Image (cartoon, helix red, strand yellow):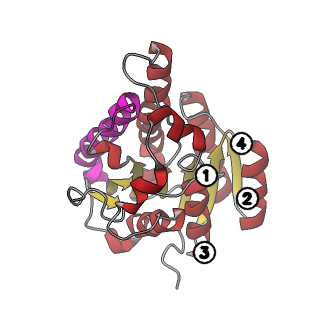
Amino acid sequence: MARLDGKVALITGGARGIGEAHARAFAAEGAQVVIGDLLDDRGSALAAELGAVFVRMDVTSSADWAAAVDATVSAHGKLNVLVNNAGILRFRTVADMAEEELRRVLDVNLIGPWLGMKAVIEPMRRAGGGSIINTSSVEGYAAAAGLSAYAASKFGVRGITKAAARELGAHGIRVNSLHPGGVATELALDPSNADATGIDPEAFFKAIPLGRWGLPQDVAGAAVYLASDESAYCTGTEVLVDGGLLSGPGY
């Protein structure tokens, strides 16, 4: 028996990167998967490959959330797992960042997950409970120069996760957060990010105790655990997947 047999999962930002790894891992473990994303071509292709459902959605839109949840329940009769994975990253110092950029990052990375949690409460209650997995970051623990907006959003995800865990536990709904760091994604490997921050990515990743880049599937493994019944007594929990990056200073 696979670890997620019988579960229905909605994964946002599921068309690429860590979200794609989540979709692949969940499907391999027996879950019925619904992929939400703005990338129509990649999302549709992945859904076709996995036998999943693709829903085009903007996580900042409550109407899109309602449509995605309705599509999930219509396709599979229930909703057990939400993975709030969609997110964006902007490198700007406080002095250089425009207010509109700040608000956009907060809208996608913080308001989006909050809207998602709100949208799945009732279907999860009807299903007898569920698991909400919110994606934060190592930047939700320790901020870096040039990432004030991103860090604010990811610190915020920790807060809404713990508040929702307190509120929803009585309904059998668990709410936990994932904190990836040092993971090799398209965004992390974009050379323009190094140009914007002045950070040498190779030097940065050599400082990771495990001595390698993290892979999207490393994060997906933690998500499978939080979605499964193996984590039935975990709520309000923060799971670091960072190769030891935050274990201490690098000297």
Q: Earlier in the sequence, mark 4 or mark 2?
A: 4
Q: Earlier in the sequence, mark 3 or mark 4?
A: 3
Residue sitting at x 59%, y 43%: 191
- The answer to whether the residues at label 2 and label 1 have Cβ atoms under 8 Å apart is yes
SS at badge 1: loop
Amino acid type at image mark 1: Gly
Question: Is the residue 81 above or below the residue 95 in the image?
Answer: below
Q: Position of residue 47 (x, y in %)?
A: 73, 58
Q: Which residue is mark 4?
A: 39
Q: Earlier in the sequence, mark 3 or mark 1?
A: 1
Estimate the spatial distance between the alpha carbons at disc 4 and disc 1, rounded to whole Å.
Answer: 9 Å
Q: Position of residue 124 (x, y in %)?
A: 44, 52
Estimate the spatial distance between the alpha carbons at disc 4 and disc 2, rounded to whole Å.
Answer: 11 Å
- The answer to whether the residues at label 2 and label 3 have Cβ atoms under 8 Å apart is no
Estimate the spatial distance between the alpha carbons at disc 3 and disc 1, rounded to whole Å.
Answer: 15 Å
Q: Which numbered circle lies on residue 46?
A: 2
Estimate the spatial distance between the alpha carbons at disc 3 and disc 4, rounded to whole Å.
Answer: 22 Å
Q: Which residue is mark 3?
A: 28
- Magenta residues span 144-172
